[in-house]
Image: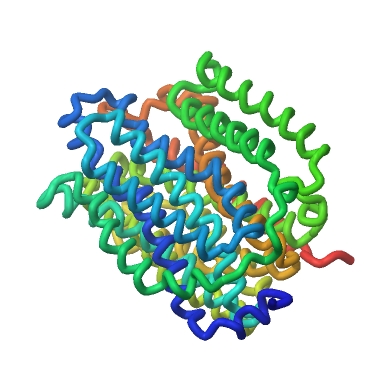
Amino acid sequence: MPKGAGNAGDSYPQRRLILSVACLGAFMAALDTSIVNIALPQIAREFHSSLVQISWVMVVYLLLNVSLLLTSGRLGDLLAPGRLFILGMLIFTGASALCGLSRGLAFLVAGRAFQGVGASLMLGVAPKLIALAYREGERGLALGLFSMAFATGISVGAPLGGIITTYLGWPYIFFLNLPICGMVLILGGRALGRLPASSAWDRRAFDLWGGLTLAGTLGFFLLSLTRMRASGWRDAWTLGTLGLAAGLGVLLFFLERRQAAPLFPADLWRDRAFILGSLAVVLTFGAVMGAFFLLPFFLEQTYGYSPKQTGFLLAAVSVTNALVAPWGGYLADRLGNLLVLRTGTGLMFLGLGSLIFTWPESGTLSLAARFGLIGLGFGLFQAPNLNEILKGVKPAFIGLAASTNAVLKNLGALLGITLIVTVFAWINLHQVRLGAGVCLGITSFQSAFAVAVLVGAVNLLANLLPRKPG
């Protein structure tokens, strides 16, 4: 049995196939976070659903996906990760068929819930597959390609969903997953099945009750943040779910103290590189996604762009991110993780800062360049940061560390969006009502972008700290 990830890479001649399968899993999981959004109006009309009811098609997928990621990563450390990935893909495929065949909202929401479970297994285990198949000196490029696959899934979701919904109907946005999953299982099933578990299964090494409590904590916390964006801090439903999250968080703390193999192992959370890398993930996604949330309103209200034009302009962020991500990993293998991720953080800060200095006279190319600069920094940052986090992690904790990173991305994004909305409410800018008939001045947006820039500045300073002790 290989002693570590580096030797594992030499043991599997089909490692490129393993990387391709991991990337396709990331692509599909990311695609289904964005491709469904464009079809929601059509689904709502067909099922005669309200806006609140139809929103569960999106919310339940994200809730199950994020809430179970950490548990999935831990299982990837204890069981054969390739077979666990295949299980996730099979669940995802079956759930996609259920979604496409649904004739009512309840069945569709149930299918989306199972999709979230399958996606959490794929995303939680995929970095473990890459770490097993590639040595440290080669892992940066592999993680960069993985980041590119994830970003590409998000980028193509909206336009692809629009085309499929228009010409084939909304069920086919789910049926699209079936041939892709089938191809992945046929081509990569044998290679994945050969990957052994890092250690023998020990029931005591899996914290079942901690995993369930963590899922509840994250689930209620995400629900409270989602509700907070719409109704503010004083809403009873928001305070109730936030209170439940806090209560479960306290329970989780005491449960973890009694566990021999906790979900938050002390060895992991005492590692300086892991802590600083995790902090950087939260700050990066908070700054970028907080600003990204406002940009559609900014472009449509300040410049009068149509939704179609806005979509193409915002693609500058995700497309640039997808194109640059592999290069970020490639350069990290040759120049070092810290140099590349710090460069990316600096470019993100400059791109976010440039949003403050936009005016109605700014041209389309000028706006696209600003968005592209943010995407460039975003792409350079992600793979080197994850590579730096995993570099000092014991092989037995790689899956847990990578899935923690994935959870923190989502939490950072939601916290960033919530912070931006809270700032709008605090300065009483139309009580955060950004819907039709409300026109905010450009200075209002600039004030909100300044918050994202402030978070970006803290992120830049945090990334300049040395990640090795002493």
Task: Name the spot of residue 106 as percent of width and height, x first.
Answer: 30, 28
What's the residue at 61%, 77% (across, down)? Answer: 332
Q: In this picture, is 34 found above or below 149?
A: above
What's the residue at 61%, 32% (across, down)? Answer: 217
Question: Visible in this render: residue 453?
Answer: no
Q: Quadrant of the N terminus?
A: bottom right
Task: Name the spot of residue 250 as percent of width and height, x first.
Answer: 74, 28
What's the residue at 72%, 33% (across, down)? Answer: 252
Left-right relation of 247 to 302? right
Q: Quadrant of the C terminus?
A: bottom right
- Viewer-side residue, 68 vs 50: 68
- Viewer-side residue, 268 vs 451: 268
Q: Quadrant of residue 384?
A: bottom right
- Viewer-side residue, 162 vs 377: 162
Task: Name the spot of residue 210 as percent of width and height, x first.
Answer: 69, 38
Q: In this picture, is 89 found above or below 242?
A: below
**Which residue is the extreme one toward the right?**
470
Left-right relation of 431 to 137? left
